Amino acid sequence: MRRTIARRRTAIEDRLETTLPESGAFDRSPEELLEFGRPWLRAQVFLAAADGFGGERPLEALVPIAASLELASLQTRLHRSAVEDARRTGLEPTGDVLLGDLLESTAFELMAGVDADPPLVERCLAALAEATRAVQEGQASLASAPRSTALEADDVRRIGALTGCAVELAALLADVEPRRELGRYGSELGYCIRSRRSENRLPTDRRFCPADRSRWLEPIVERCPPDSRATVRAQLSAVLEAGLDRESADPIT
């Protein structure tokens, strides 16, 4: 599986290199953005779930969606970093905020160009729009809440919304139901993944994240069609094993 994950990583990397916008208006070049320690798990969760559901689309047809998720994730990380830097330095984060907005619009442009029937593309765009809005709401709730405060279920799902979107998009492409429930539990998985990273200073809530992390996947697996459960579990387990504890810009070796 590690070779498969590395191959997917390379395909996404290649697509991002040709997609990231060149703009002299911002301090960071596309090459610097590729080294920004960006999140890559959402894209890998999408590709793992799409494979697990037994979709017939080849990797090259799925990569634009994976790259779109990665750009949306990078936008979130860039905005979060900009706000934290502003609090520390007192400087306005205007440039990075605008660059994040540009990345988000590029993510939607990629999604809109997916090679699929127009109604399916529209549903994919709607899912991404809902997730990006939710994750911004989750960031706002997180910023205003005391660190010791237990989060509400809705906030947990907002924080992990892009991971939930990855699972929902895979279900949508494979025509698997109940895709909304799969997306909801995918969001909880996204929260669990993020809460494990100490630099995010996000408390781990055992209501959603059991101490045994192998159980994090079970709510998703239980809602998969019976004939795909074993494959979805194996695919997602491999992704978590490869990258749970880091958000790396480097390909897996």
Image (cartoon, grey):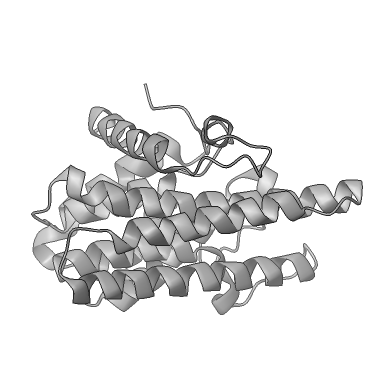
Q: Is residue 233 visible?
A: no
Instruction: Determine which quarter of the picture holds residue 220.
Output: bottom left
x and y, in percent, of residue 49 in the image: 25, 55
**Direction from residue 203 to residue 168 in the image, left or right:** left
**Direction from residue 74 to residue 243 in the image, left or right:** left
Which one is nearer the viewer's eye here, 105 or 35? Answer: 105
The residue most toward the front is: 24
Looking at the rendering, in which quadrant would you find the C terminus? top left
Q: Is residue 127 visible?
A: yes
Q: Residue at x 49, y 32 (%)?
A: 249
Q: Is 10 situated above or below 124? A: above
x and y, in percent, of residue 64 in the image: 30, 50
Looking at the rendering, in which quadrant would you find the N terminus? top left
x and y, in percent, of residue 164 in the image: 40, 65
Which one is nearer the viewer's eye here, 169 or 48? Answer: 169
Q: Is 40 situated above or below 128? A: above
The residue most toward the right is: 90
Q: Residue at x 56, y 67 (%)?
A: 135
Q: Residue at x 50, y 44 (%)?
A: 39
Q: Residue at x 37, y 48 (%)?
A: 67
x and y, in percent, of residue 28 in the image: 63, 37
**Direction from residue 18 to residue 49 in the image, left or right:** left
